Amino acid sequence: MLIANFKYGPHNLAMNDHETSDQVVVVIVNWERPEDTIQCIHSVLESKYPNFKILVVDNGSRDDSIEKISQACDQITLIALPDNIGFTGGYNAGIEKALENGAPFIFLLNNDTVIDENTLSLLANTKWDISVPKITFYEPPNIIWAAGARWRSIPPTIKMNGYKKPDGPAYDQAYQLDYATGCALMIKIEVLDRISGFDPLYVNYMEDYDFSFRAREAGFSIGYVPEARVKHKVSQSLGESSPQRWKFLGRNTVLFYRNHDRFPIYIIWLVLGWISIREFMQGNSRYLSAFWSGAREGFDICKGEA
């Protein structure tokens, strides 16, 4: 693993005890999308929060990502991983490096996002142990992508609040959450000290819901901060229609519900059946083969973990 620091200055990751008292380390993972990552970094650099560092993890890119990012952004620390180890592996590498320096807050941020100048300040000054902003689509920015997430009893699934709904007063109230998306996640260091980072079994997708579940089981709170804003370009790496994405969704749905016998066995069959019927009715039956292939893999993993 190569760690390179560019222009040690106001956002150098190395820090002393005084600097860490209220510091936020922003962790961004890049995989062969340097333009998105650079735009994301620049939005963070415009933050009004006075004490932050930026840590970029390049997840084994085979293009010129490292060169482009280092040339365009000289106030970051860059970790270059030799291989792509997935969303969970990339963020865990960033979390591990950030924890070495003792900052009280770690902000996990997708590289296909742009944040508002007040977002860091708002998320770092809440009563919650884990805080999430209001996330809208990048285009159009007045449509909600996620205002947190909640548990829905029928069917027994996690649902993103406000998904594809117009932004408005209904999404302007702060409240405690059941679950949070990893797209933009402010985490107090005490949470990571207790439950560690993302479960590497997930690789991509639903690792944030597993993280939320474990955090709440450990007694930590999750909250929605609507004044904090992030715009999200959505699934730039694998794409919404990618068979690989659908395989991961099938695989990780099983992992979330069945790993460590978290829910009764009948629950996962209800969920898998409901998703299959929903996607068939929405004209997405072409994705179901990949989805069920992933589900079978998930069951095999859970059987091996038992």
Image (cartoon, helix red, strand yellow):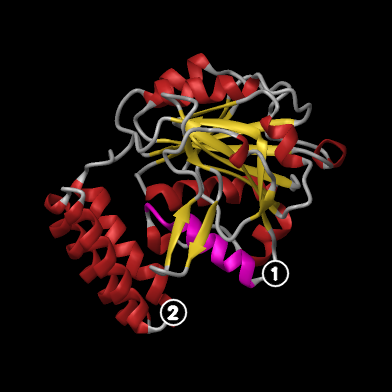
In terms of secondary structure, where does tag 2 sit? loop
Residue underneath mark 2: 263
Point 28% across, 41% down: residue: 240
Image spot of residue 249 (x, y percent): 30, 57
**Magenta stretch: residue 213 in it?**
yes
Query: Residue 133 versus residue 85: which sits nearer the camera?
Result: 133
Q: Is residue 217 left or right of residue 28?
A: right
Estimate how packed mark 1 is, as few (under 14), some (14 to 19) or many (20 or more) residues with alpha carbons within 10 Å.
Answer: few
Q: Residue at x 51, y 49 (%)?
A: 161
- Identified by mark 2, the residue type is Phe
Q: Is residue 301 left or right of residue 134?
A: left
Give the image location of residue 86, x and y in percent: 37, 49
**Residue 301 visible in the current orientation:** no
Q: Which residue is mark 1?
A: 219
Q: Residues within 10 Å of mark 2 (few under 14, many from 20)?
A: few
Our reading of the magenta stretch's main secondary structure is helix
Q: Earlier in the sequence, mark 2 or mark 1?
A: 1
177 inside magenta stretch = no
Residue 109, above or below 99: above
Real-space Cα distance between discs 2 and 1? Answer: 19 Å
Q: Which residues are magenta?
A: 204-217
Three-letter residue code for mark 1 = Gly
Residue 90, visible in the rendered structure: yes
Image x and y of residue 155, in percent: 38, 68
Q: Is residue 173 left or right of residue 200?
A: right
Q: Nearer the viewer, residue 114 or 162?
A: 162
Give the number of marks: 2
Side (left or right) of 204 relative to 90:
left
- Name the quarter where the C terminus is drawn: bottom left
Residue 151 image point, x, y percent: 50, 63
Looking at the rendered structure, the secondary structure element under dot 1 is loop
Q: Is residue 178 above or below residue 9?
A: below
